[in-house]
Image (cartoon, helix red, strand yellow):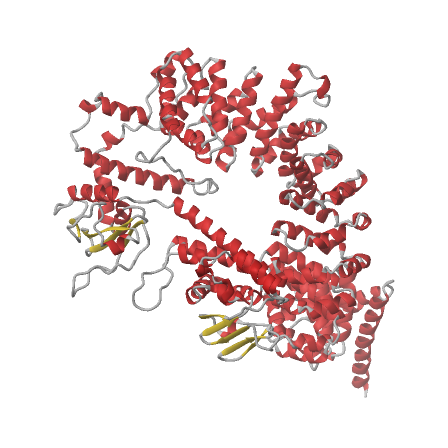
């Protein structure tokens, strides 16, 4: 981290005061990577997160003390963490505005507290602590000396007996890995940035000067350099500024604004601080965003410049119109004659310019003017293209064209020559050119882009519409290879290549079908391509290819003809796999009869066939209709069988398909009946392949929802293995592991196993994460463990209850609800639960305020938690003061039975303090409760009867109940087999009757 911050991060020049980080995309990317590292540190490395730094990291923070909640002692101007070192010193101390932090755990929690301000806090921390490794580990680990951290730490361990040396070494290694990651990330980031050269900048300025002047049609009033002296390297900036990549400074006077002082640098163009009044020197400080070139900058800053530039473009539309759209070039050509006479590509027209064939038909325009306007037109086209395709191709990278002046390998120019032969040669020359092109390494990006840049894509697609099978095969083989490139994929779709390939699927030639399907599989990786395939009937045709392999289950006896049928079906499945990423395409595959055919192919022993077939089923199994069809076609049996394959990719896709399908109980039972649980358990032991591990743990999680499966997993020692996987794993694995543990811990025997295997601590450590799905699962698991008193003692000792309570502040409703459900067994089984709950500063007010949520699950879980909190009289008094009665009363008019159940229980408990019974009546909560008795849910009946019994202690409430017909409904429940319901109903009727007798007696006396 020290080297990366010193060499990669971009700091302001050493001027007045200390150096600070510049506001650049690179710095922002580095800070975000550091934030991700620190945020995940606490649950990926829980032991190291507790390590106390040699010196605190200090900086001025923008956070206020009020932002800190439970776990901190907060006053008006200071904050101290409850977590302390062995000397009793807090690991976080804030004295506004200075903050000191001495552990990664507290750093991670601070970023969670900072929320949207985390980037600002990270920047302030980095600026104030220029060599953080020294402060974290001590001066022996000084990165500024240039020594290797690994050698330093190893030597340190061998020299002393410090018990923390091993932890120090691990932290040093982690920081070294982060340092290398940041350096690599910086290099990738820098490599993507556009680098301007002095020659390019000078050319742009000279061109703009030609179109500047006083007229209305000129683009600028004036543009001039701030310095007349030009160095030998073409730069005009002072040498000490050239070290920062700056090339020159120009003064630009647009028609509609003040004079702008602009810095042109290798990294782009930006507005600087202008010339100083006294000495006329340039204020080099950047005052705007960075733009890729001068024209783009001026378009953004001056509407008049943009408008006049567009007028100039329109006036020369005749010139620019000669750059034909690629689709015009790719018109159908059914014979060789038409193909050879088809319109030329943009590249051909540029060649025509050089030969002079079109010179006579164009207006006389200077080369510089045409070049500037062409450049402007390309910018407009690029902006329009980007904005129009953003919604549907957001996963596709931007289109990077090769620069003409770039150093290109010889293959680039050789391929361009071959493309010329494709355009102008006869049939024999075309076939030879295609074969020669195949000899190049078409997996190399330079070769792929060479074909595209010279117009080769248009020719290859045009060849697909000829009558010559050899040419079609050669063209498809090349397109299949180069379509792995995302830019090429998009170009093929733009040129209308997909509909032609879909038509080839009807060809009687099986080789053509295979190649067309494989190319479609490569191209249909983004939404627009998937839609095009469907709209041109491609889904139906691809499903039909699956029917080619009539007897693919016996490969040893297959003839050559049958082997080709199998290959056709494999290629069809491969294309369907790509297309099945779209919801609409999934439905189209089902309607075309794809499921029975996929089920039949699943019985084959061809592994290369099985992978795309299972991949397609895995994608489609997310739809409920597919899950029902998968059960009907008995596909689960074959998925289970292939779990025992030696192919890791096939195992992964089978496990993922089971994960998708196991949402249904019947499917979970089928997995067990076909013996699928044991291979899943055995696959857990191989943790090297993380993608497969994520799929396997996901399948185990979903299968664990059924108790019968959990019993089997206990026999196979799966729970112990899952506990071992609950640390040092990727998040996608942890989500599934913790989800499975949460399901398994619903049973007492499994809770004991988790506790004895030391599984409580890693679960509690995960409560400080930020992944929503992981937090939902881990809170459920911790809540399940808390049912056992022995486990609850460990959870309490590890501060797990406070961490659960802090999750009630999480912005995601699912996390809030899951945390509230988990708190219920914690409060119920904790020793001195009332005192524990009161120890959380602001905790009771927080949970009462959650009753204002709009989410039914959050409301039900909070009501359940309040029921447990209200068992303590002091806590009941506190939540009453926070307004729990009116908030509960406001929720009474609900039709959700789950909420009704827990709401009635909460009201019943809250009635036991002061005049809360009367208050519930005043807030109109009684009449809605009576209606709960008409529900079909026995739990709702019991909780409601108990609430009405408590409320009936007040005379006015008895009258309301009687008026709303409670007596008749309660009389029916007195005969219920549920004893608690019997007693509550009878008690409520007794109170109502007693009031009626007292009223009658008063009337006659």
Total numbered circles: 0
Closer to us: 327 or 369: 369
Q: Is residue 400 above or below residue 8?
A: above
Q: Left or right: where does residue 629 sit relative to residue 466? A: right
Q: Position of residue 29 (x, y in %)?
A: 44, 53
The image quadrant that residue 337 belongs to is top left
Q: Residue at x 35, y 64 (%)?
A: 19
Closer to us: 452 or 3: 3
Q: Residue at x 76, y 65 (%)?
A: 791
Q: Residue furthest bottom?
A: 1005
Which image quadrant: the C terminus?
Answer: bottom right
Q: Position of residue 475 (x, y in %)?
A: 46, 21
Q: Left or right: where does residue 285 sit relative to residue 757? A: left
Q: Residue at x 37, y 26 (%)?
A: 455
Q: Residue furthest front?
A: 159
The image quadrant that residue 753 belongs to is bottom right
Q: Left or right: where does residue 621 sit relative to residue 60? A: right
Q: Residue furthest left?
A: 214
Closer to us: 716 or 905: 716
């Amino acid at each position: 981290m020290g080297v990366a911050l010193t060499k990669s991060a971009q700091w302001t020049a050493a001027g007045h005061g200390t150096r600070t980080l510049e506001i650049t995309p690179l710095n922002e990317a580095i800070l975000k990577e550091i934030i991700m590292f620190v945020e995940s540190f606490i649950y990926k490395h829980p032991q190291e997160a507790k390590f106390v730094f040699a010196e605190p990291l200090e900086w001025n923070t923008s956070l206020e003390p009020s932002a800190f909640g439970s776990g901190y002692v907060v006053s008006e101007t200071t904050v101290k963490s409850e977590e302390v070192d062995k000397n009793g010193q807090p690991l976080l101390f804030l004295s506004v505005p200075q903050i000191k932090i001495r552990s990664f755990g507290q750093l991670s929690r601070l970023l969670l507290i900072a929320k949207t301000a985390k980037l600002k806090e990270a920047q302030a921390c980095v600026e104030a602590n220029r060599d953080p490794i020294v402060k974290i580990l001590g001066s022996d680990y000084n990165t500024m000396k240039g020594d290797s951290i690994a050698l330093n730490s190893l030597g340190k361990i061998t020299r002393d007996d410090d018990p923390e040396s091993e932890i120090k070494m691990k932290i040093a290694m982690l920081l070294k890995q982060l340092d290398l990651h940041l350096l690599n990330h910086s290099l990738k980031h820098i490599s993507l940035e556009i680098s301007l050269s002095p020659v390019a900048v000078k050319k742009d300025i000279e061109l703009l000067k030609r179109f500047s002047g006083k007229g209305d049609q000129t683009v600028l009033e004036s543009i001039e350099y701030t310095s007349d002296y030009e160095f030998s390297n073409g730069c005009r900036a002072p040498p000490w500024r050239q070290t920062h990549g700056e090339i020159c400074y120009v003064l630009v006077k647009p028609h509609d604004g003040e004079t702008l002082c602009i810095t042109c640098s290798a990294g782009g163009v930006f507005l600087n601080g202008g010339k100083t009044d006294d000495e006329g020197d340039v204020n080099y400080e950047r005052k705007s965003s960075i733009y890729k070139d001068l024209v783009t900058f001026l378009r953004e800053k001056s509407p008049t410049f943009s408008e006049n530039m567009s007028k100039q473009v329109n006036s020369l539309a005749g010139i620019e119109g000669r750059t034909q759209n690629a689709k015009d070039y790719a018109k159908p050509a059914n014979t060789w004659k038409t193909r050879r006479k088809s319109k030329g590509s943009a590249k051909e027209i540029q060649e025509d310019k050089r030969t002079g064939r079109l010179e006579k038909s164009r207006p006389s325009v200077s080369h510089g003017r045409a070049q500037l306007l062409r450049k402007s037109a390309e910018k407009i086209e690029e902006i329009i293209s980007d904005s129009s395709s953003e919604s549907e191709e957001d996963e596709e990278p931007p289109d990077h064209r090769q620069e003409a002046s770039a150093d290109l390998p010889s293959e680039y120019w050789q391929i361009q020559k071959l493309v010329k032969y494709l355009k102008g040669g006869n049939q024999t020359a075309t076939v030879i050119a295609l074969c020669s092109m195949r000899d190049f390494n078409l997996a190399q990006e330079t070769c792929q882009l060479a074909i595209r840049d010279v117009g080769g894509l248009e020719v290859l697609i045009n060849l697909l519409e000829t009558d010559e099978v050899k040419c079609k095969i050669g063209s498809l083989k090349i397109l299949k290879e180069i379509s792995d490139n995302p830019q090429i994929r998009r170009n093929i779709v733009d040129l209308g290549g997909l509909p032609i390939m879909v038509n080839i699927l009807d060809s009687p030639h099986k080789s053509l079908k295979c190649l067309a399907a494989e190319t479609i599989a490569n191209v249909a990786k983004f939404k627009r391509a998937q839609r095009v395939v469907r709209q041109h009937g491609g889904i139906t045709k691809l499903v039909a290819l699956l029917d080619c392999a009539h007897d693919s289950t016996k490969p040893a006896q297959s003839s050559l003809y049958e082997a080709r049928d199998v290959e056709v079906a494999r290629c069809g499945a491969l294309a369907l796999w790509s297309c099945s990423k779209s919801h609409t395409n999934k439905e189209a595959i089902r309607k075309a009869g794809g499921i029975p055919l996929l089920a039949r192919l699943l019985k084959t022993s061809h592994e290369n066939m099985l992978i795309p077939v299972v991949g397609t089923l895995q994608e489609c199994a997310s739809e409920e209709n597919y899950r029902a069809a998968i059960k009907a076609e008995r596909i689960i049996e074959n998925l289970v069988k292939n779990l025992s394959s030696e192919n890791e990719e096939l195992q992964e896709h089978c496990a993922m398909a089971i994960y998708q399908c196991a949402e249904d109980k019947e499917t979970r039972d089928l997995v067990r009946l076909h013996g699928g649980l044991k291979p899943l358990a055995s696959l857990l032991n191989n943790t090297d392949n993380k993608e497969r591990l994520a799929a396997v743990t996901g399948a185990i999680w979903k299968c664990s929802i059924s108790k019968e499966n959990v019993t089997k997993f206990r026999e196979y020692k799966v729970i112990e293995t899952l506990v071992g996987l609950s640390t040092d794993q990727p998040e996608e694995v942890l989500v599934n592991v913790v989800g499975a543990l949460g399901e398994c811990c619903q049973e007492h025997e499994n809770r004991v196993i988790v506790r004895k295997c030391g599984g409580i601590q890693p679960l509690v450590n995960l409560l400080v994460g930020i992944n929503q799905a992981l937090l939902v699962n881990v809170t459920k698991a911790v809540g399940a463990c808390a049912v056992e008193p022995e486990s609850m003692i460990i959870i309490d000792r590890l501060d797990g209850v406070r961490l659960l309570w802090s999750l009630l502040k999480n912005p995601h409703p699912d996390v809030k609800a899951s945390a509230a459900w988990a708190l219920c067994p914690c409060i119920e089984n904790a020793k001195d639960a009332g005192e524990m709950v009161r120890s959380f500063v602001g905790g009771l007010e927080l949970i009462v305020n959650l009753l204002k949520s709009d989410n039914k699950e959050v409301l039900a879980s909070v009501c359940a938690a309040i029921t447990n909190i209200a068992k303590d009289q002091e806590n009941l008094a506190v939540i009453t003061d926070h307004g729990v009665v009116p908030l509960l009363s406001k929720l009474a008019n609900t039709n959700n039975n789950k909420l009704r159940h827990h709401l009635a229980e909460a009201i019943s408990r809250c009635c036991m303090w002061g005049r809360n019974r009367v208050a519930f009546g005043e807030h109109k909560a009684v009449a809605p409760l009576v209606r709960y008795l008409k529900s079909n849910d026995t739990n709702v009946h019991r909780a409601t009867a108990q609430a009405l019994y408590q409320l009936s202690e007040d005379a006015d409430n008895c009258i309301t109940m009687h008026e709303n017909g409670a007596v008749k409904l309660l009389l029916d429940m007195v005969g219920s087999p549920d004893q608690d319901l019997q007693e509550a109903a009878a008690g409520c009727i007794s109170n109502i009757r007693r009031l009626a007798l007292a009223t009658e007696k008063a009337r006659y006396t």
